[in-house]
Image (cartoon, coloured by chain):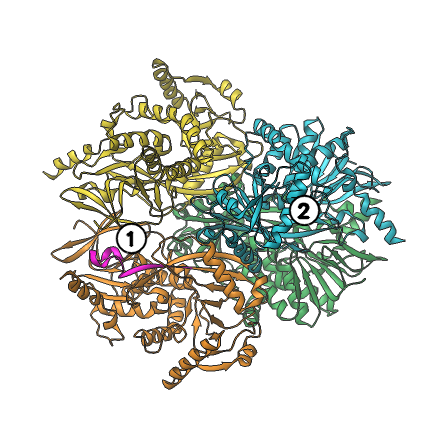
Chain colours: A yellow, B green, C orange, D cyan
Amino acid sequence: LRAKFFDVIIVGGGVIGCSIAYQLSKQGKQVLLLDRGKVGGESSQAAAGMLGVQAELDIDNPLYKLAKRSRNLFPSIAEELREITGRDILLQHNGMLKIAQTEEAAIHLKEIVKQQQSLNEEATWLTKEEVLQIEPSLSEHLVGGIHFPNESNVSAVELTTAFAEAAVHYGTRIKEYSYVENLVIKNDICKGIQTNYGEYAAEHVVLATGAWSSKWLPDPLQTNTIYPVKGEAFLVRTNPVPIKKTIFGNGCYIVPKKGGELLIGATMKSHTFNKEVSLGGISELMQKAMEILPCLSDAEVSSMWAGIRPMTSDGIPIIGPHPEIEGVTFATGHFRNGILLSPITGHLVANQLLGIEQEQLGLDVMNPNRFFRQEMVMSK
Amino acid sequence: LRAKFFDVIIVGGGVIGCSIAYQLSKQGKQVLLLDRGKVGGESSQAAAGMLGVQAELDIDNPLYKLAKRSRNLFPSIAEELREITGRDILLQHNGMLKIAQTEEAAIHLKEIVKQQQSLNEEATWLTKEEVLQIEPSLSEHLVGGIHFPNESNVSAVELTTAFAEAAVHYGTRIKEYSYVENLVIKNDICKGIQTNYGEYAAEHVVLATGAWSSKWLPDPLQTNTIYPVKGEAFLVRTNPVPIKKTIFGNGCYIVPKKGGELLIGATMKSHTFNKEVSLGGISELMQKAMEILPCLSDAEVSSMWAGIRPMTSDGIPIIGPHPEIEGVTFATGHFRNGILLSPITGHLVANQLLGIEQEQLGLDVMNPNRFFRQEMVMSK
Amino acid sequence: LRAKFFDVIIVGGGVIGCSIAYQLSKQGKQVLLLDRGKVGGESSQAAAGMLGVQAELDIDNPLYKLAKRSRNLFPSIAEELREITGRDILLQHNGMLKIAQTEEAAIHLKEIVKQQQSLNEEATWLTKEEVLQIEPSLSEHLVGGIHFPNESNVSAVELTTAFAEAAVHYGTRIKEYSYVENLVIKNDICKGIQTNYGEYAAEHVVLATGAWSSKWLPDPLQTNTIYPVKGEAFLVRTNPVPIKKTIFGNGCYIVPKKGGELLIGATMKSHTFNKEVSLGGISELMQKAMEILPCLSDAEVSSMWAGIRPMTSDGIPIIGPHPEIEGVTFATGHFRNGILLSPITGHLVANQLLGIEQEQLGLDVMNPNRFFRQEMVMSK
Amino acid sequence: LRAKFFDVIIVGGGVIGCSIAYQLSKQGKQVLLLDRGKVGGESSQAAAGMLGVQAELDIDNPLYKLAKRSRNLFPSIAEELREITGRDILLQHNGMLKIAQTEEAAIHLKEIVKQQQSLNEEATWLTKEEVLQIEPSLSEHLVGGIHFPNESNVSAVELTTAFAEAAVHYGTRIKEYSYVENLVIKNDICKGIQTNYGEYAAEHVVLATGAWSSKWLPDPLQTNTIYPVKGEAFLVRTNPVPIKKTIFGNGCYIVPKKGGELLIGATMKSHTFNKEVSLGGISELMQKAMEILPCLSDAEVSSMWAGIRPMTSDGIPIIGPHPEIEGVTFATGHFRNGILLSPITGHLVANQLLGIEQEQLGLDVMNPNRFFRQEMVMSK
């Protein structure tokens, strides 16, 4: 290969790619990070930045522990990134209320509280009155809710940018507007990549390409192994800010961001890369938000957008070595949990490439080989 | 007055002020047009551009004949403006369907058809099947509708800009970002105006200041004689375009604009100058639009905005001489009909100032003195 | 192939792809048009829309005749597209002034006039005084200029959209946000394409992918055969509009668009896909524009943007069959002439695929095989 | 007056009005703050947020001490506002380099250093080499520069919003989109104000209306006592950030903002309220910035804007009681120093209205009566 040599090339400058670049370059590796457009320009800038572990994942989900571990990394990551870059990722430990708007939902949520408490997790069932005492602006059409005091949120944009800047601080080279046409493979070993700017050689290539990852998979796996799920969201301004905690209701969450705006998300539409805001999607989300928090009716809609999340066929991210091509590592498929899982993913992938032994932490379950084994069966 | 002298100063560069400037300067008058911001920057750029006479006004409304006369002026105005400015005001004679979504509404609309037909106006009642034959994308939840084949629409922005450019062509001087602080009045005769750029003298001052007109009225008339009514609207893109005619339903109209976008309006909220798009307002409008035209659910929302219309206490514009101050003429209060009435208003005011005799055309009913007489009674 | 079958799949929804889709579907072909983003979302929306043949191309350039032929197609294309879509492509026959700002430039331009006149082309040398008589707002720092009365301009955005809508009218199916991962090739015959939405089969695949075309070329041709050249431009508003004709000066052109804005372009920077507006690029362009037209100093800058043009190593577009893969046709590399050449490219490619015999019109010189032959030599 | 009664009504929701509202309501006063548009929507959002005392003001300027006092208030204000509102005003003590690009400028700057040092102010002359050691990306076309280590900067937008939110926290009521038509005056005593929403009564009215203040002055003072000076500025993104300190050069300053963008300002054009960005203004500013920091040539221009600053005929703000109307207080005319002077202005005006005795701090020199005395002379 007639090209500059790097220790690691990371394809994709979303929050996952940036977090990995940060950890690797901090350990002294020569890293090249490529993005087809701008760093953080896709789902990382569309995300709500909720760090919802208990509210988002069942306690027996294989990601649960991993997600909790990742959430716990945020305070130190926030501190580190502030020191290196001067940037504030706007971490807020404001807690979350997951509310039940029907009796049926209440039964389900009470079950969750039991499970959580049986494992000594902090989660409390609140009656309607107790919920309204904490958040008096909520609609009275609710039965009760769970209070998760440890759930928090960050600015997804600031986090991604801070990871990128901190990576650059440690020597990572970033090339935006770079298209990776192909991996350069010889004898099932990846030697580097071919881009619109020429070729680059590297010992390792990490594919952190989010919803645009299926092209790296063999043909029979391309259709459904990893696929796009569009999400629409919007931002409103109100004065004064009517809630303190993140509210998680039926098909809708409302996140009070530092600075006073409320971020409201998110719709789900599978198998499309279309990033337009649809009339049907956004207006249904608006209705749901007002059912939870009626005073939003007078709020100013300050912006609307859509992003494309990477979903996998089993709902679990794909992290680990390519089973057929040496030197290629996947780090994708984080669906709605990319911001939350970005710190731990950075550590896991860096440790793996550096040959540092680590707790399994669910690595098994995320291993890409689970799909390739299937494929062999399919092909037979 | 130590100031440049004009024949007429027009305060307010919306579609009304620009139309008057055009007619006056075409007749050789020296005209100065002032706007606090940019020409066409307020409700003229927020308007849908529907030319709805039969669909918007009752047949016994004193504005009905005036509005019809104004609508009929559009083809020749479009031609004139194109010749002078090269600009296309995007006039479309696509007709309008006013639909009944309930049996009750159908009874009301059938009554309108009778009235219209009794005066030989073109208006036909269509059954549900007939409506759906013309516009097969409409929801089947409708009872029937009126077809008004003569209703049409224009681009409100292009019309306003074309009037302004045609006025400049005939010598009108436009000063944007000019604040008129006060009228200069001596012995109940207006001698000119005082602005942030200094004073300007003129024989006549025309107040075409839309929703911001109450400051020109005496104190007891300021609160409710003329007041702002906010309207929110939005634009969607669909492909292919699902309707040909303007659809007028319950609290919502959908206008297919030249170029393929659909403009959907409009909410009404009185007594506010706030131009933010509210969550409650816009989402209700979105729901109504989808009830009429379900395929809008997949349409891309390309923009949203609000404008401030000038409403009067009796719903009729205020056009004519100030009853107490010589040299001052009102031309305001057009509410939802500013675009439609702009050609006729330009003619009426110009003729009045030029001393040209004209048909009454409803001038009596629009005369400002109707409020001042009232005021005298109030003060007694 | 387990996929829907089309006669022709066109990859790339810029003005070239849309023009080809229009011609083919008008002839009854089943066409699928795919775009990675939105139709017309890349250089077609960044273009100035100048139809500059005599001002842009040397008379002995192999594209000259083709370009002239294409320019002459615009009046009928405008008419056709208006009839089908109702859309006005804003064709203006306003002519062009190519000015000399130095004596040296004047000598060169006079030479061009001679060449043009020797072939009976309409082009006249004007002295400084004559130039200023036609365009009195131009700076007096000029020596003279050529008047090309037949040069004209269109709206690049309206043209692209109108081609797309007219194609849809004749049955073309458009899928936006579609990524073509690979051509499906068996025994050197292309059977269709593989996309993020699955596979599509077709008899022919047309590659109209502009600056993003090198991925379709064999490895040794990827670097320089076709490459991106970024161009920055901006739009200003002035009142009144100071020029009537397009002005072509030193490194800068100023196009008066219908509607009164002036479009000013364009910088050139090779080998980058970065679409940001750079401080150095845009400010130099601004300085050049003010040297030509000093009154621009007070004009409002209403927007700035950049687009990525497809340049080829010999400056000639790449149009014609893939020399090594049956069923694949190139239609790319139009550099600064994509809008101008779009009508003729649509005809040429459609005729070729339909097997209609046609004049050569420079097809030879644009044949992709010129590069592949080279490659064989290189590889030896 | 048939209206709600307040202790103090503040007209104008820029940084000055908001700072005064904060101090007064913190002291228990009932405050109403009105803005014609949105809070912070005019020059407060256009400001660069530099806290430049030594770099902006001559040491014998009557504002010098006041400005220094105000700058010193920022750390505690930042702390207070963060506690109350959770908002970070992004205060940065990064220091400033005022560079000399010519020998002549160097002589002048060395003189300033002497003056500063004679009063024990921190200011050091640096040679070219020393400047380039601190900021190696600066152009070598410089002679030397002054280092002011105590100069700092904030986010103008965050500061204004935080003052407003903190005021609301203490009970201030904010009404946006409110037009104050007139002061209500009886026997030379102000009783309240008349707005588009009706009348409001108050003991005191504070006029913090920035460049739009001349309407409150008697006729002979309206033209030049206080007038608008437009300023254009722009923001660029670079990676990595090339400077650490604010650079102050010839007609141009470059402020590195927290978050990595560089804010570059600012042009000056008197006597216009036009907020458009002009081609001549912005391109000259761009050229100056690149002369100082050549690597900006590759930076992305991310936004451009203009704001309207309030200048006075003697260059000093107008703060203090109206000499002819009891109950009215001016707080306007801060020109380029509104952000810097906002903390001290809040204290001064609040103390004055609360009858708290205070150091003079230049109150004399800012007293509005200096113009009114003049007027009496003029009128004689």
Q: Chain of mark 1?
A: A
Task: Kindly tell me whether residue D14 is visible in this rendering.
Answer: no
- Residue under disc 1 on the same chain as residue under disc 2: no
Q: Is residue D370 shown left or right of residue A21? A: right
Badge 2 density bin: few <14, some 14–19, many ≥20, Cα 10 Å: many
* Residue C121: percent from left, percent from top: 39, 82
Amino acid bearing label 1? Asn
What element does badge 1 sit on?
loop
Residue sitting nearer the eye, C101 or B185: C101
Query: Is residue C51 highlighted in magenta?
Result: no
In-image side of B110 versus A18 (left or right):
right
Over which residues does the magenta segment extend? C214-231
Q: Is residue A78 left or right of B347 when viewed as pictured?
A: left
- Residue sitting at 20 percent across and 44 percent down? A191
From the image, tell me which residue sits under label 2.
D335
Verify whether residue C228 appears in magenta. Answer: yes
Near-viewer residue (B20 or B246): B20
Q: Nearer the viewer, residue A42 or D70?
A: D70
**Whether residue A52 can be seen here:** yes
Pointer 1 with pointer 2, Cβ within 8 A: no
Q: Check disc 1 and report the residue beneath it.
A: A196
The image shows residue A360 at horizontal and vertical percentages of 25, 24
Residue type at the position of mark 2? Phe
Structural crowding at the residue carrying mark 1, measured as other residues with C-alpha within 10 Å and reported as few (<14), some (14–19) or many (≥20) = many
Residue B102 position (above or below residue C44): above
Task: Look at the numbered disc 2 and give the secondary structure of its residue.
Answer: helix
Marks 1 and 2, Cα distance to the nearest angstrom? 50 Å
Question: Which part of the image, by quadrant, shows the N terminus of chain D?
Answer: top right
**Quarter-of-image position of residue B172:** bottom right
The mark found on residue B14 in the picture is: none
Is A12 drawn above or below residue C25 in the view shown? above
